[in-house]
């Protein structure tokens, strides 16, 4: 079977291969601690689950639901944007429900990019920005996210020749994998930049509600004029511990929302109604439990950072998202580092270059593991680093 050209260059998904390697170790009886994936380990609040199960028992909730989510779900998104960000949105024209934000990230590439267009993608980044662009036939231009720029792209460094052909600009704050945050002033600058250069902004914001130390992440839609140029992707996966429910949203420019909706009408038929009802409960119900959950992540973050600093690995303290982004010692290859760490200690962390060439020299450690396992994992890393030759390189 010869697959279509548009998928020939797709690289194997790193985490699928890693999971196979981990299963093999577990079959040998090894105790593996996974600090590599960003899938929330905690459940949603009880009232969300109760809403879903009650709705599932009703006889009239089992049919198809409207494309892009029920009006109740889209109205709940409107309410959330109003209360959380102070952003007024029209649920009919500026909101569409998604099967996780990932679906929307894929779709936006298909609905705005033509072959030959340039797609401006941060590096390192969540891989879907590149695959969505490449499948659409676009040329990907990587914008380095460098530590000296607080992991924000340097827009002024994009060559004029690239800018004239560029159509789509991707951003993601709070950021995966670096844990970086973007001040609202940066979003103001990006919106002006997009207006000037006729760009569409796709802002991926699934970590907007995973914040620490009192930090509150902004939405790009708070910037005046953002609705002219931007669409923001958001999700219940991380905010409400609902990753498996696959509830996401796109909010922003009505033309973009219309295009995404038209594409979706050809591809999917939305969710099971009780799942959407659970989403409504999550978005419109008591939000205070989210603070308590974030405190759990913050304690885990502190344990990771303490472990990293104990062995002299440089990592800034993230104020949001679910990851520590740490430098491996000079001269050490991070793929080799992670493979040896897993083999020797059973602790799995992610090599930074999985997220792009500017992730080289870094590892990503996730906070999605209970504190006791996470501390045990960090203790194994500290011990291994102290015993291991890599410390000598550092
Ligand atoms: C930056 C980023 N965007 C999007 C997603 C996908 O999230 P969802 O579950 O909403 O599809 C993830 C998941 O880890 C992510 O890290």
Image (cartoon, rainbow, N blue to C red):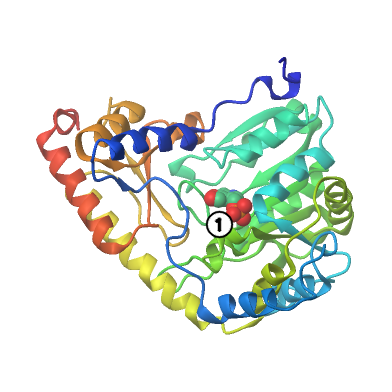
Left/right placement of residue 188 relative to residue 110 reads left
**Residue drawn at 70 percent across, 67 percent down:** 222
Residue 71 rendering spot, x and y as whole percentages: 83, 72
Q: Is residue 127 left or right of residue 159?
A: left
Label 1 crowd bin: few (<14), some (14–19), many (20+), radius 10 Å: some
Q: Is residue 123 above or below residue 305?
A: above
Q: Secondary structure at mark 1?
A: loop
Q: Is residue 279 above or below residue 47?
A: above
Q: Which residue bears the numbered disc 1?
A: 182
Any part of residue 273 in sight: yes
Instruction: Tell me which corner region of the image, top left, top right, bottom left or bottom right, holds residue 50.
Output: bottom right
In percent of the image, x 85 and y 71: which residue is there?
A: 90
Picture coordinates of residue 194, whole percent (x, y): 77, 47
**Residue 183 in sight from this viewpoint:** no
The image quadrant of residue 131 is top right
Name above or below for residue 31 compared with residue 220: above
Q: x, y (%) of residue 172?
A: 60, 50
């Amino acid at each position: 079977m010869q697959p279509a050209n548009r998928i020939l260059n797709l690289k194997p998904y790193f985490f699928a291969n890693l999971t196979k390697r981990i299963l093999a170790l577990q079959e040998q009886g090894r105790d593996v601690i996974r600090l590599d994936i960003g899938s929330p380990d905690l459940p949603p609040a009880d009232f969300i689950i109760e809403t879903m199960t009650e709705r599932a028992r009703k006889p009239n909730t089992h049919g198809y639901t409207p494309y892009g989510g029920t009006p109740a779900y889209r109205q709940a998104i409107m309410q959330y944007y109003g209360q959380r960000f102070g952003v007024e949105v029209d649920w009919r024209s500026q909101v569409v429900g998604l099967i996780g934000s990932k679906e929307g990230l894929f779709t936006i590439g298909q609905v705005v990019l033509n072959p030959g267009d340039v797609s401006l993608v941060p590096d390192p980044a969540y891989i879907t920005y590149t695959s969505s662009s490449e499948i659409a036939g676009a040329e990907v231009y990587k914008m380095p996210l460098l530590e000296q720029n607080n992991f924000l792209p340097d827009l002024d460094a994009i060559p004029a020749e690239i800018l004239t052909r560029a159509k789509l600009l991707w951003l993601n704050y709070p950021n995966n994998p670096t844990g970086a945050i973007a001040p609202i002033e940066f979003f103001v600058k990006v919106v002006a930049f997009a207006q000037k250069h006729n760009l569409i902004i796709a802002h991926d914001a699934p970590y907007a509600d995973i914040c620490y130390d009192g930090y509150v992440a902004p939405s790009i839609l708070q910037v005046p004029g953002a609705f002219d140029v931007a669409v923001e992707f958001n999700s219940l996966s991380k905010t409400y511990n609902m990753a498996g429910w696959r509830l996401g949203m796109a909010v922003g420019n009505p033309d973009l929302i219309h295009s995404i909706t038209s594409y979706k009408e050809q591809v999917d038929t939305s969710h099971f109604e009780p799942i959407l009802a659970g989403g409504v409960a999550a978005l419109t119900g008591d939000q205070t439990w989210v603070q308590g959950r974030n405190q759990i992540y913050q304690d885990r973050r502190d344990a990771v950072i303490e472990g990293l600093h104990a062995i002299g690995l440089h990592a800034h303290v993230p104020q949001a998202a679910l990851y520590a982004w740490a430098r491996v010692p000079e001269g050490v290859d991070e793929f080799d580092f992670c493979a040896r760490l897993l083999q020797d200690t059973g602790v799995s962390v992610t090599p930074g270059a999985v997220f792009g060439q500017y992730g080289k020299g870094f590892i990503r450690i996730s906070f999605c593991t209970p504190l006791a396992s996470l501390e045990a994992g960090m203790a194994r890393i500290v011990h291994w680093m102290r015993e291991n030759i890599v410390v000598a390189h550092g």
